[in-house]
Image (cartoon, helix red, strand yellow):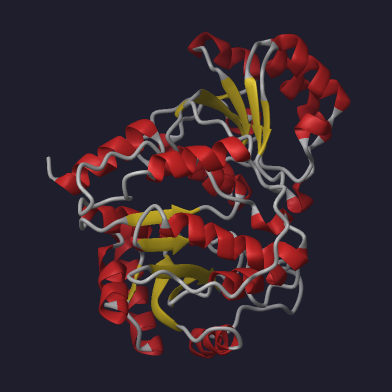
Amino acid sequence: MNAAETHETVRWESGMRYQTHTPDAPGPRPGGVFIADRLAWQMNLPTRPQRLVILAEDQFGEIGSKTALGVIRYGRDTIVAVIDSTRAGRNVRDWLGEPYDIPVAATLAETLPARPTALLLGTAPAGGKLPDSWRIIVLDAIQAGMHIRSGLHTFIGDDPEFAAAAAAAGVEITDYRRSPERMEVSSGREHLPGKKVILTVGTDCALGKMSVALELRRAALNAGLAGVFVPTGQTGMMIDGWGVAVDRVISDFLNGTCEWLVEQAEAMGDWIFVEGQGSLDHPAYSAVTLGLIHGCTPQAMVMVHQVGRTHHHGWEETPHMLKPLPGYIRLHEQVAALVAPTVVACVALNTSLFSESEARREIARTAEETGLPTDDPYRFGGERLLDALRERLG
């Protein structure tokens, strides 16, 4: 096993507990584990892997279950079951393939023989509110001795009934969207010498910006580079064990929080892949995108687009159509240059709606249309896009 493979094995087996033997070793620098663990402790985030049941009622496999799908694909926890009564009896491998042999159950009670230790709320409803029908499931899980992990805007830990039940059962409630106590505006901090900061941006929300960043980090580690993923949303935090859900941060402090996250990542490695959020022209979620661009001051951006999507998610019945890529790429470079010049270095396509042959045709068409290196890193690996970034940034 080579050094990069060693790092990847340690990464997946132990979350943020990276292993480095010399100052020049690939992977995050010595001390990265302590930085990540310290950040997790400061943010009251769990550091011990769990046996998860994921609640994704009436949504699993759809765009609304992106938290569930992301944690299953990339997380460090063992997933023992998914709860979705509308798909009960099926298996996660029906959606994600053979490596994911995870049953879909109708009720929490059906999952208990698998000895789960935590319930993760795995959908992202508009506004991040807890569905009323989920209350009894959350209470039953607490009474069964299970920790609760939630990325909703509704804080489970602030609910008196849930809080009292958790205290009585001796379990923890983790609300990943709870903002850190620090309240600092951006200082204009410059990146440290030798650091490469890359931000994933997109034509819409919920189309794979986090997955692209994770695939690029994976490709970097496999190439022997010191790659670090910066979680900026609840799903990324569940996967990597640290970060901030920046869509919850007060707007005055959004840029400063993004700047601070990059500073923490630079202490862990050299190639920094920041998870993007929203889209610059989404009628509901544009503000968080702007804060990430101006707060992170990336040296390069990766434009993410789902082939076949025509309208902004949640606005399908309105005139808000997605913009053509060439002009949209120029717009991002112009908006970023208001604070710090940068470039869109490559395009990452989500080709999940197409067959493999159709996907390859769309990749070639988009490369010709934009004049930029293009690939689907989730489907075909992140190596080609990483090569484009290395060529651009040196």
Left or right position of 269 against 152 = left
**In the rendering, at what x and y percent does residue 35 appear?**
46, 44
Task: Say above or below: 284 vs 368.
Answer: above
Task: Say above or below: 161 vs 43.
Answer: above
Query: Residue at horizontal 39%, vertical 45%?
Result: 32
Task: Say above or below: 60 vs 351.
Answer: above
* Of residues 198 and 368, the one drawn nearer to the viewer in this rendering: 198
> Which of the 4 quarters of the picture holds residue 296?
bottom right
**In the rendering, at what x and y percent does residue 36 appear?**
47, 43
* Of residues 199 and 259, the one drawn nearer to the viewer in this rendering: 259
Image mark count: 0
Query: Residue at horizontal 21%, vertical 40%?
Result: 6
* Of residues 174 and 119, the one drawn nearer to the viewer in this rendering: 174
Q: Is residue 256 visible?
A: yes
**In the rendering, at what x and y percent does residue 312 appear?**
66, 70
Left or right position of 170 against 300 = right
Q: Name the residue at the left extreme.
A: 1
Q: Name the residue at the right extreme.
A: 160
Task: For the C terminus, give its image quadrant.
Answer: bottom left
* Of residues 253 and 360, the one drawn nearer to the viewer in this rendering: 253
**In the rendering, at what x and y percent does residue 90 appear?**
49, 29
Q: Is residue 98 visible?
A: no
Left or right position of 181 against 235 = right
Query: Residue at horizontal 29%, vertical 76%?
Result: 388
Query: Residue at horizontal 82%, vertical 17%?
Result: 164
Task: Say above or below: 227 vs 91.
Answer: below
Task: For the N terminus, give its image quadrant.
Answer: top left
